Amino acid sequence: MRALVAGFVVALAVVASGAAAAPPTKVPGELRVGLSMPAAGFQVGAVRGRDVVLAKGLEVDLARLLARRLGITRVRFVNEPFLSTLVRAGKKDWDIALAQITVTPVRAKRVDFSTAYLTADQGVLVRRGLATKPTTIAALRRLQLCAERTSTGGQLIVDRIKPTRKPRLLNNPSSLSYDLFTQRCDAIVFDAPTLAVLQRQAPDRYGPLVGRIVTREKYAIALEKGSPLRPQINAALASVIRSGALKQLRRRWLGTDTSTLRVLR
Amino acid sequence: MSAPLRLAISLLAAGVVASTSAQASAPATTVEVALLQGEQVVHVDRPGSTVRAAVSALLVGPTRAEKAREITSQVPAGTPLRSVSFARGVATVDLGERFAGGRNAESLSARAAQVVLTGTRVPGVRAVRLRVKGGTPLGLFPGVVASHPLTAKDVLAPDLPPPGPPAPSAPRPPSEATRALQQRLADLGYLAPSGVDGRPGPQTTSAVVAFQKWTGLARDGVVGPATQAALAAAARPGPIRPASGRRVEVLLDRQVALLIDGDRVTRVLDVSTGKPGYETPVGSWRVIRKEQRSWSVPYSVWLPWATYFVGGVAFHEYPEVPPIAASHGCVRVPRWDAAWLYSQTPIGTPVTVIASSR
């Protein structure tokens, strides 16, 4: 069945354009992109069900650049409320997914990854008015920490920080920043670039970004296991990086260079 | 009580008085549209009685006369209204893509607050559900979680204390030269007498900047040869407009405020007024309201020691007082002078905002 479908798609592509090199996307001539909004700087927008009616951010622009490199004019975005859905094993109805997805060995068994488009650490953003700003991991242990349930930050709290107070693991990043603002959390552990954008956007809602915990996470594009699109996505990404376009996107959407933040040990 | 709430209630009270005197039982014939002035929301009346009328009027923005009073809006001009519906106290307002345009975080969250504070003023509307291009916003309005219906309380002052003062940095060692400079600045009215301690620091720099602003020198806070010479020859500034009694003059061209008693300028303050597009309104005003802790609803920021003198425009403490006009229309005062200025300007104190003082 799979071969039959693939054959059909190839036939369609050949009929449609006459070009044998048309990218093997799910719907010929269209790049369907999975997102998991919101993440300040990376992807924000508006959704109706799973359909994205409006999207902007670094990853949105990056997906459009990749599509252009592949010669695809139509880009369609779909949103998954939970990142975990994007990296679950099995069939996907999107071609590529961008959601600051960190490459991990477990995830790599379930989906395929492109080469990395960003390397980032985890950041620690504290609430406003916190008396003593933590400068070590030991100091973090005594705080009410919060993170997104299925994220690297959540894992880091459990495995490495090992706090004395039970951490609050929340289902989405919006509740995370809101709980920090309303002081239900002393500190949140999340992707440093996103925290830097959040803090810069509304400096009076939060305390400072006190530092980072080095994780050197590689953000990569997820594809369905065995996706034939991967070589072309890698080539397009390499070209986007080589041309300096990705650097421009980082300046435009992220601004702050979080690799210069204090390292918490 | 929070500043915006009190303002809102006072305006509401005025509205109630007006309508009762007209006809007590008649349905509302005006809607209250949330526009911005200085750091605050001001409600202005427009004809109509529905959420649709109120939001449509919001999208049109301030009138020419309101613009002349520096009343503004962060809602992008030409934003289309796609639809409005209403069920069980929640109004759903669907706006075009333009509404989420731009990347200025404070503008984005202010415009979301404007829609919520406009919609929830319509009788029977408890909350507003925002939609953009038919979709639920996810992260579009920084600091405003618009994925569920928002009440006025959700965008009003948070139930939290404002942050305390920043941790003091280690004091620099005192020197006689610094003390002499400070004494000279204090004698001329640029520095509070309590600031004469011989130690260099931001308060002294700010006093030097105030002097440079008044004198027309480069505003770098550094006492170079030009500033040194001018300081030696300077006299205490005088009022721009002769009058009697305690009053304040805000000089937009020089970016200083003069606190005046009779014909004597008691202090020259380093301030920063409204940036282009948000100009502090020129004219003769009086202090109308004072808030030790004021919260800017549209811009989600604390304004300690706020002394309001016209609509949402106030003197208030702010961590950064750059040498140029940088605010949303308010007059930013450095933290070492803010509480003192607050104590010197009771309700009724005249405040004159002057565009050109030379």
Image: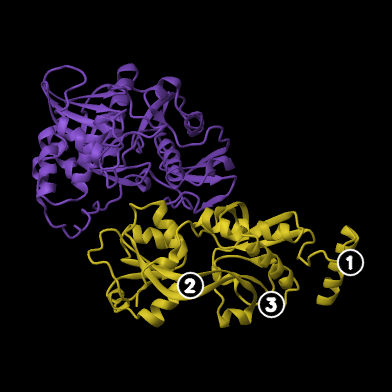
Q: Is residue B44 above or below residue B295?
A: above
Label 1 is placed on what type of residue? Ala
Rendered hue of chain A is yellow
Give the x, y percent position of residue A101: 56, 70
Q: Quadrant of the N terminus of chain B?
A: top left
In the rendered image, which residue does mark 1 sit on? A11
Q: Residues within 10 Å of mark 3 (few under 14, many from 20)?
A: some
Give the x, y percent position of residue B82: 59, 38
**Marks 2 and 1 on same chain:** yes
Of residues A149 and B292, which is closer to you in this image?
Answer: B292
Distance between mark 1 and mark 3 Cα atoms: 22 Å
Rendered hue of chain B is purple
Q: Which mark is residue B48?
A: none
Q: Chain of mark 1?
A: A
Mark sitting earlier along the chain (2/1):
1
Q: Chain of mark 3?
A: A
Give the x, y percent position of residue A14: 89, 63
Distance between mark 3 and mark 2 Cα atoms: 21 Å
Q: Residues within 10 Å of mark 1 (few under 14, many from 20)?
A: few
Q: Chain of mark 2?
A: A
Q: Which mark is residue A151?
A: 2
Q: How many marks?
A: 3
In the rendered image, which residue does mark 3 sit on? A225
Mark sitting earlier along the chain (3/2):
2
Instruction: Classify mark 3: helix, strand or loop.
Output: loop
Q: Is residue A73 visible?
A: yes
Label 2 is placed on what type of residue? Ser
Of residues A34 and A210, which is closer to you in this image?
Answer: A210
A139 relative to B33 in the view: left or right: left
